[in-house]
Amino acid sequence: MKKHFLKSILTFIALLCSTVFFGQDYSFKNYDWDAKDTKIEVPKNYENEKEFILNRTIKIEIAVDKNSSVQYRLIHEKKYINSDDAIERNNKVYIPIGDQANIIINKLRVILKSGKIITLDKKDIKEEIDEEKGMKYNYFAINGLEKGAVIEKLYVLQEMPNLKGNTVKLQDEFPIAASSFELIYPEHLIFKTKSYNGLSEPELDEKTLEHKRILRVSEKDTPALKDDEQYSNWDVRVKLFRYKLDTNLYSGARNLNSFKEYATSTYEIVNPVLDKKQEKAIANFCSSIPQSKDTQEQIWNIENKIKKTIIYDKYIDSKSSLAEVLSTKQANSPDIVKLYIAVFKYFKIEQNLVFTSSRYKVPFDKDFESHENLAEFLFYFPAIKKYLTPTEIEYRLPLFPNYLGNNNGLFLKEKIFAGVPMGIGEVNFIEIPGTEITHDFMDITVDFTKDLENPLITSKMTYGGYSGMNFQPIKDFVSAEQYKTMLKSISENYTLQNEYKTLTTENDGTEFVGKKPYQLNLTFDGKDMIQKAGGNYLFSVGQTIGRQMEFYQESKRLLPIEIDYPHYYTRKIKILLPDGATIKNLDKFVMDFKTDLDGKTEAAFTSKYTQNKNEVIVENTEFYNIINYPLSSFDQYKAVINAAADFNKIVVIVTQ
């Protein structure tokens, strides 16, 4: 599924307002590694590490004059290789360069244990294309890497400055013996900074460089933080350093890049005064949108019409007017936002444009007003307390990308002052739709009455909310044959790779997203779930609910739990036996695992059974009410997750 179609208004404003000319001087212009420094000294406490960073130096210098600004970024790193796995991981060293960056220095060498040096140059740079992402990568191909070697790389990049907000990660998946980060800038500028997750506070140096200031963060023995723990959010748990330009002493401007400033300027951009031609075009467009007295349905109709009519392309140029957007049926980020707002106004629907960030990339910190917090956007409707994503074509109200929820956002609200409308920014929390939306049901009947060796299994499975999003929209984006193949793949999770007798679906396609849950109806022979043992039949009844996630954590857990969205499962299995048959081991269906927080059960797996003559009914529920669970609750949470996997392994004995 497509994950990321968004382009923020922030980028649009930056492209309009920033003029960058390259060529200013910078303090580390003559920086180089020491050609004679080829001795490898490994600190004792790192001798048994499979891979670690001996030293990492990062410098970012911002050079400005009256008309231009430019940023220079230096990365100098020495990495020690001490295992076969490390050799395999590091035989490609990728070159970090963005779309708007120029490489000034690009050097890499390998210092072998013997003291021999392998120097890589341009001929060793290879190209790799990620067809799925449509991206091209350049990397150094290293040959002859061995245990005990050091890879030393040095880059200097020239790029657009990050004055409105930037985050630097100063922790890694491998230990770092020593690291240093410097932010260098002219003395007439003042930056606001913040350290996260135990990172040292920066020290201000106003003496080393004339007319320049240095904010320096130095760390020793930074432990590794592995990015391999299930249900976690590594990117926001590592040591982070954030900065943004706050004051320009030359101009006297203070509190720069604030939320208030952003809200005011953005409101003016996305709420232009429409001339008669544009008003007519909007009215004509709205006349084709089905009308409803129900606010939520009306918003759904608007979203559906725009997404099926206007092609969103973040790379195209802005159109001169909304009339042109509608005639060409194309829109970039600012244009699509302006169109939605104009249509909402036509239908007199109150909305807030909400700016936020991915909670898996940059934490939205309401106390640190960086434009990094404002990289993504949604619409919020106070009347129904729900959100809409304007650019993700497969979503429909009330569903939006889950990574934008459970997060703060800047809500842009319209207020009237002396008869003049203005934009006011207010930080609020973005709730993700809960278990009332994402609720899955399984209704399964296992009929042994005609054949103990081959029961007929009938499954009716309903997937709601975000769970349904895994299947529901696909029908509109693939061929009929591809969709049929997908359905067969889904069925194999329940039939143990066998052919089904019947398979039907209900509510597939975007026309049902956000309105009705996706439904899969399946019948199949259960002979492969039966194993005969003498006069008994061993029935793997747990397999009827499909394979379940099993949660392994071999090492000590370091990160708290974070899941994508709240989720609820209700399952019912009805077993029908022929006259004279008995069933044993039913006590295995009795299960009760819970995660309690502050006296309230926030996650659970519970199961029970009842028997009435030849009918056995097994019922279980599994739910995760919240997204974040503390590290102290890890063992309880793990038990809940694994309970479903344990249920999947249950075998009962049927005897005639």
Image (cartoon, rainbow, N blue to C red):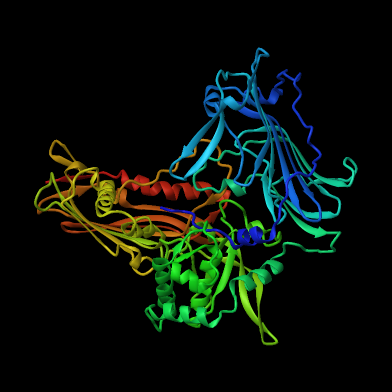
Q: Residue at x 30, y 62 (%)?
A: 508
Is 434 placed left or right of 197 in the picture? left
In this rendering, would 369 be left or right of 480?
Answer: right
Count of numbered badges drawn on the protein:
0
**Residue 137 pos. (x, y %):** 53, 37
Rendered position, 2 above or below 353: above
Q: Which is nearer the eye, 374 or 470?
A: 374
Displayed quadrant of residue 292: bottom left
In the image, residue 367 sits, relative to residue 632, either above or below, namely below
Image coords of residue 380 (percent x, y): 53, 71
Considering depth in this image, is 270 or 363 the residue closer to the camera? 270
Residue 382: x %, y % from top left = 53, 76
Q: In the rendered image of this protein, does residue 425 appear above or below residue 174?
A: below
| Depth order, front residue of 100/199 | 100
Q: Can residue 136 be seen by looking at this rendering?
A: yes
Outermost residue, bottom side: 419
Residue 551: x percent and y percent?
44, 43
